[in-house]
Amino acid sequence: MGPDIRELMAKVILNHGAGGEIMQEFISKHIICHYPKVKTDVPLDSMDDSAVVDGIVFTTDGHTVKPLIFPGGDIGRLSVAGTVNDIAVMGAEPLALSCSLVLEAGLDLDIVDEVLRSVGETSRECGVPVVTGDTKVVEAGGVDEMIMVTSAIGRRTPLLDHNLRIASEYRKVDSKWTTDDNVRPGDVIIASGTVGDHGIAILSFREGYGFESVIESDVAPLNGMIAEAMKAGGITAMKDPTRGGIANTLNEWCSKSKVGLDITEKDIPLRQGVVSACEMLGLDPFSIGNEGKVIIACVPEVAEDVLRALRGNKYGRDAAIIGRAVESEVPRVVLRTEVGGRRILEPPAGDPVPRIC
């Protein structure tokens, strides 16, 4: 006799940490509800990329990626880049990082050195130092090799004020930060590059799929590129489409900003290797996680300037305008397909590739 469904529903499952609707419901019902409510500039229950408390931008990230080292990156680069990006997409300047390690006894020290060397290299690349941390070791089997937890703080700069001032020349801007609830009808939606690379790189390497071309993770710190885009100005919202991919990001914007999004499928940048892998495995590339991309909403009057700034950076060469925000009685993402039809891009239940970050 199999397990009772009620017993299964009372257990933590992988999808509780995979982004998407299941994770959001889990966080709301089992985590945030137990914390005291605090009035802040950007509160915890907004579920944005970072919180803002007394002008200080603060975020934290736990990383359990498997394998620790993969094509295009490793858990060290992933941790630094992902945490820095969470600060940067709020429109803030990342200032400092913490790095906490939980190591499994028996882990090869050469792996530890390689990963921590990568932490240092990525920290230097993005100009955000690691200033504090913690290290714990547990018995063999207590964790799967390594868990890395990184936190970061950031601050508001005149660049964010400049950016929002330009946006406010063309429409009312309600938020002091580039938050999820700040998208309005008419805003242009931009993807900074090809999507789905990271999740497919992890999956193909982990499972040993022999695709014709090696797919590498896109993991990268984006604070420099984002700063260049903000110099062009007029950006109203930004988000890094990690777990759940751009499908999750776009649906979050619809829900929080109460708008529809009209997206043109053929304009979304995709590598042919990712397309082929997804077709073979029956996956939707728009629901696959990314670690080196940002989705941007900006006022239409400056969209080409923002696009030009992104393409001028090595991490944004494939940037493209993919759609617009529209008035909609039902906030949802409508995808204009390549054959001329339309379909709803549903919010994913969770990222179909587990443990990618």
Image (cartoon, helix red, strand yellow):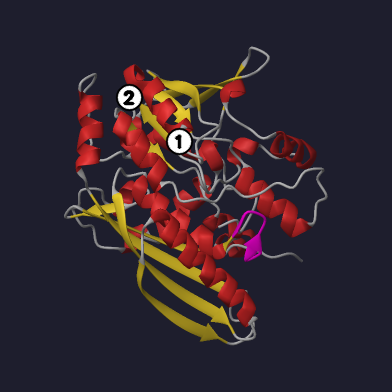
Reply above or below: 62 against 352.
below
The span from disc 1 to disc 2 (Cα, nearest Å) is 15 Å
Q: Which residue in the structure is indicated by mark 2?
A: 184
Q: Which mark is residue 234?
A: none
Three-letter residue code for mark 1: Ile
Badge 2 crowding class, 10 Å Cα cut-off, few under 14, some 14 to 19, many 20 or more, is many
Q: Is residue 170 above or below residue 136?
A: above
Q: Nearer the viewer, mark 1 or mark 2?
A: 1
- Give the quadrant of the N terminus: bottom right
Q: Position of residue 56 (x, y in %)?
A: 22, 56
Q: Is residue 288 magenta?
A: no
- Label 1 crowd (10 A; few <14 / some 14-19 / many >=20): many
Check disc 2 and give the amino acid type.
Arg
Residue placed at 57% from the left, 59% from the top?
Answer: 9
Please indicate, yes or no, whether residue 237 appears anywhere in the rendered image: no
Q: Position of residue 25 (x, y in %)?
A: 46, 50
Sooner in the amino-acid sequence: mark 1 or mark 2: 2
Q: Is 52 left or right of 245, judged from the image as shown?
A: left
User: What residue is at 63 percent from the left and 85 percent from the top?
Assistant: 140
Q: Is residue 194 visible?
A: yes
Q: Secondary structure at mark 2?
A: loop
Q: Secondary structure at mark 1?
A: strand
Q: Which residues are magenta?
A: 67-73
Q: Is residue 70 magenta?
A: yes
> Which residue is pictured at 29% across the width and 63% down the height?
35
Q: Locate residue 259: give its quadrant.
A: top left
**Disc 1 designates what residue?**
295
Q: Which of these two is toward me, 155 or 136?
A: 155
